Each structure stands twice: as structure tokens, then as C-alpha cells.
Image (cartoon, grey):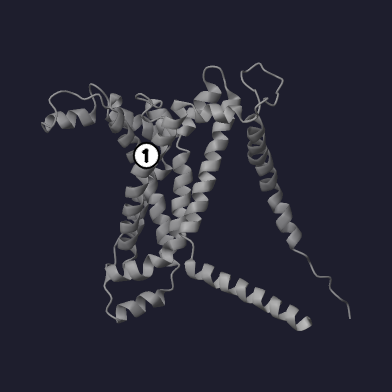
Amino acid sequence: MKQHKSINYAKYGYIFSIPFVLTFLIFSLYPLLYTTVIGFTDLRGLTKTSIHILDNPFGNFQSILQNPTFVKSLSTTFIIWIMNFIPQIVLALLLTAWFTNRSLHVKGQGMFKVLIYMPNIITAATIAILFYSLFGYPKGPVNDLLMQLGITKAPQNFHLQKWTARGVVAFIQFWMWYGNTMIILIAGVLGINPTLFEAAEIDGATATQIFFKITLPRLKTILLYTLVTSMVGGLQMFDIPKLFLLGGPDNATLTTSVFIYNQAFSGSYLYNRASAASLIMFLIIAVLSSFMFYLLRDKDAAKQKKQARELKKALKMAEKEVAV
């Protein structure tokens, strides 16, 4: 009887992954390692060809941390992120509860979801120009509306008002991303066992009780993912602050990414300082992400793992005693 040789399909997976691996190595890993090295060197300027490690390798990091503009950009980044993330997650949760409520039977869900998600696919440059025109001075739709309603008697130069500029940037970020957050949360809800909702409805639970007692606890992992990705994206805000008011007025919308860009590609081209600032932001993001993972961890699962380790350790000790 002729024996057929088994076919190993695993090699095709490796073959198809080669383009991604090469792209990652060239465009992600190499720039990351190179940036790390530059942070400890004296590389600056367009014409410099030789690179030397500084006598004080952490000199660039000390200079960045002592730079008041960087400290201000860091606080501004956190402020704008918090201003846009809190309403973003609240509205996304409300829309998720509305769309997934079994008793409402919302009609035209597909159309609503497309319209809500639409701002996320519009280019940042287009949105920045749009809002710059909306808040234009002395003529702009917002100024015209406020004057017609009698709220203001003269046109306001919103571009020179710090908190107004921050509020506009935060609103743009919120408007662009709340639809994306909603889609992720809806996907998480659809992954919950429907029998749990049916049992709760039979027991007479209200929609509010179902959402807070069943839906939210089982969305903890999705909420953690949303929180971490939003934080990473928020701390890397660049396009809207850069294109809207170039970081102004008085650095009120200057985020750390814009600061790093200015260090690297404006003035004296301080690539070493820009790399140092990038590494500092990387460490901040890594620490905050680890803290969030720890804070929102599954405590029951962690307790079970701890008990399993203790039991395994006790069994090993018992085996040693028996052997002795």
C-alpha cells in the first residue's frame, strides 16, 4: 500500500509573514534602535557625519527634562488628552448601550454607525483647516453666530485664547475618535454570551441593571484596550495641534510630539535632543500602560494563579520531605 507523505503547511505561514517581518525590521525596529543610540550622542545639524557618545551619556536627557518648554508640552498633552478622552469614553458607552439594548430595537443602526464613524476616516489636515476656518477672525461662522445671538458684541479672536484653542483641539480629537471607540465597545458587547442577557431579562432586570451588572464587568478587557490605545495615541498627538495653530497660542497646544518635531526639524536640528525626548515619552507611556494593566487586571484570575503557585510550591516541598 502506497504511503502518502504528509504536507507541512506551517512553512507557508512563515513565507507569507516574510514581507511583514522585513517591513517591521526596516521601518520600525531599525529606526527605534537608531533613535535610542542617537539619544546618547552629539548628533545635530544636517551636515554632521561623525557621531560620538557624550562624556555624560545622559546629558541630552537631563537637558530635555530641565527644558521648561518640554515640561509645559508634557502637561499640555495630558490636559488635552484628558479633555477629549473622558467625554469620548462616556459618549461611546452611552451609544453602545443604546445600540445593543435588546428592548429598543433601534432602526437604521448601520446608517447611524457609519455617520458616527465617518469623522475618523477624514484626514487630519482637512479637519484642522475646517476648524481653523470655523473659528476664524474677524469673520468666521462661530463669530457670526455668537454675534447674531447677542452673546458677543465684537468678534473674538479664538486663536489667541489659550483654553479655547485647547478646547477646540480636544473637541476635534474627541469628535474624530469616539466613533472608533464605540465600534470597539459594540464588538465587545456582541462577544458576551447572549444567554446572560436573556436570563437577566427573565429575572426582571432593567436595561440599566443589565448594562452595569452584566455588560460593563465583562467589558473590562475591552475598556483596558481602549484606555491604553487612547493614552498612547493621546500622548502622541501631532497632526491636529501642528496643523491647527502650530502649537500656539503661547504653546497652549504644543504637545510633546510637536515639541520633538520642532527639536529635530526646526532651527539647529537637534536630533540628539529629539531622540532623548522620544525615549522619555516611550518610558512614560510604558510605565503608565503597565500601571493601567495592573489596576484593571482580573483580580480573581490573579488570585487563582497565586494560589496555584503556592500549591505547586507546597507540593514540591512535600516531595522533598518524602524523598528525605
The quadrant in which the C terminus is found is bottom right
Q: Is residue 136 left or right of residue 66?
A: left
Along the line of sight, the residue nearer the viewer: 67 or 187: 67
The image shows residue 312 at horizontal and vertical percentages of 65, 75
The residue that disc 1 covers is: 79
Give residue 148's quadrant in the image: top left
The image shows residue 229 at horizontal and vertical percentages of 48, 49
Along the line of sight, the residue nearer the viewer: 289 or 31: 289
Q: Is residue 16 left or right of residue 120?
A: right
Q: Is residue 215 left or right of residue 317?
A: left
x 57%, y 70%: residue: 306
Give residue 55's quadrant in the image: top right
Along the line of sight, the residue nearer the viewer: 25 or 183: 25
The image shows residue 246 at horizontal and vertical percentages of 41, 25
Residue 154, visible in the rendered structure: yes
Q: Secondary structure at mark 1?
A: helix
Q: Residue furthest right?
A: 1
Give residue 47's quadrant in the image: top right
The image shows residue 71 at horizontal and vertical percentages of 44, 31
x 33%, y 34%: residue: 166
Q: Residue furthest left?
A: 150
